[in-house]
């Protein structure tokens, strides 16, 4: 005897089963992400680099009417050369800083006394109790160790990118063949187009904004004669990809070095006020103006995603938190059963395919 699927009891059992299965799948996905980080992180970085190359090559075609192969070659050359330069600086000069950080730690306590008369004894005591106790060598190893690891994986990422570029056109055809029906193929193509557009816009605009921020900050560092200016500029560029806290960290590190390197408080204030003002203006005006509502993610979701991906993939997860969450939101928006979740993840409840 079979039970009636329309009865309240049966519906309740089906709902509980769906919740149970969803929790099991979610747990397995998180476990897979954590266990497969060694393989998945270079692959994810290669996909984002590929997106940036495509965005750059499309821009070259639009501006110069160059052949596709030439635009792709220019995009690959520029992006990979820039990526190698960033990794090389972080892997070489920044390693020297990590080795000499104990020297700065020893000088930091005496440097605090220089600002005692400026900010008052209460603030000085707070800084002494909270910042001096921070293990700066651990923070430096955490930041720079990830950069060195990326330098070691640069060639693997480059290999992935090369094959992704070769199969760029063929992949579209394979998606249509694998879909089985024209309707499914059209839906998959629409989802991939939405993901590609959002990622190209985010990665491209964020790269440009980070370059502007790093360039202005580097000018300030060089003007002051700050040690390891190139490292701080590269870290400023990279940390701007971390939402909310990245721009703060990008100011704190060079400011603390300025505090212990110079005998006066002036350079410290220039870094804090100058770089801090730049970060504030770009982060609150230029960044929203250029990105607009193309991402349309809840602010709480951005912080939640930052926490989740940092927990699963460490520092690299913090850099990738926004792009990965954008992909998840778009995929959910194209699956009817998960569309309500996508609406909750969005900023204003409207998705990309909704009417304005």
Image (cartoon, rainbow, N blue to C red):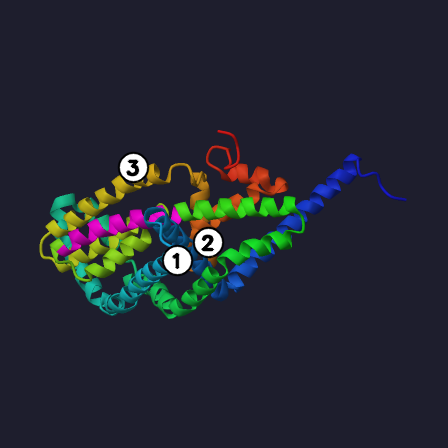
Where residue 112 sits in the image (x, y, percent)? 17, 54
Give the residues drawn in magenta, as a range. Answer: 202-222
The residue drawn where x is 41% and y is 48% is: 200
Say which residue label 3 marks.
Answer: 285
- Earlier sequence position, callout 3 versus callout 1: 1
Q: Residue 72: which numbered mark, if any?
A: 1
Label 3: element kind:
helix
- Earlier sequence position, callout 1 versus callout 2: 1
- Whole-Å distance between the Cαs marked 1 and 2? 31 Å
Q: Is residue 103 above or below residue 308?
A: below
Where residue 245 sits in the image (x, y, percent)? 34, 48
Where residue 164 sits in the image (x, y, percent)? 47, 61
**Residue 75 picture quarter:** bottom left
Say which residue label 2 marks.
Answer: 309
Task: Tell me whether the residue at label 3 lies in contact with that at label 1, contact meaning CB atoms closer than 8 angstroms.
Answer: no
Number of residues whose C-alpha sits closer than 10 Å to that of mark 3, classed few (under 14), some (14–19) or many (20 or more): few
The residue drawn where x is 51% and y is 33% is: 349
């Amino acid at each position: 005897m079979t039970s009636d699927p329309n009865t309240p009891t049966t519906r309740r059992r089906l709902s509980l089963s769906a919740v149970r299965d969803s929790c099991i799948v979610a747990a397995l996905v998180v476990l897979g992400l954590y266990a497969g980080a060694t393989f998945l992180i270079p692959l994810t970085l290669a996909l984002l680099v590929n997106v940036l190359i495509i965005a750059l090559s499309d821009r070259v075609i639009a501006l110069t009417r160059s052949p596709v192969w030439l635009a792709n070659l220019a995009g690959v050359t520029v992006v990979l050369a820039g990526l190698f330069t960033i990794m090389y600086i972080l892997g070489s000069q920044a390693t020297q800083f990590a080795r000499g950080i104990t020297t700065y730690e020893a000088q930091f306590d005496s440097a605090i006394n220089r600002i005692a008369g400026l900010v008052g004894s209460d603030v000085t005591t707070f800084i002494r109790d909270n910042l001096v106790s921070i293990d700066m060598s651990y923070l430096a190893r955490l930041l720079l160790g990830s950069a060195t690891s990326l330098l070691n994986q640069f060639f693997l990422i480059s290999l992935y990118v090369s094959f992704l570029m070769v199969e760029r056109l063929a992949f579209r055809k394979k998606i249509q063949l694998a879909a089985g029906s024209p309707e499914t193929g059209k839906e998959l193509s629409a989802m991939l187009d939405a993901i590609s557009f959002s990622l190209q816009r985010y990665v491209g605009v964020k790269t440009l904004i980070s370059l502007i921020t790093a360039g202005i900050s580097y000018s300030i560092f060089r003007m002051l004669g700050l040690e390891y200016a190139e490292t701080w500029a590269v870290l400023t560029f990279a940390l701007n990809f971390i939402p909310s806290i990245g721009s703060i960290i990008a100011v704190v590190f060079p400011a603390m070095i300025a505090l212990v390197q110079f005998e006066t408080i002036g350079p410290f204030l220039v870094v804090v006020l100058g770089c801090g003002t730049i970060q504030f203006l770009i982060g609150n005006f230029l960044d929203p103006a250029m990105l607009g509502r193309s991402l349309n993610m809840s602010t709480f979701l951005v912080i939640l995603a930052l926490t989740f991906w940092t927990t699963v993939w460490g520092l690299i997860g913090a850099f990738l938190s926004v792009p990965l969450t954008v992909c998840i939101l778009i995929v959910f928006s194209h699956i009817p059963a998960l569309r309500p979740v996508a609406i909750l993840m969005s900023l204003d409840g409207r998705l990309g395919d909704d009417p304005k």
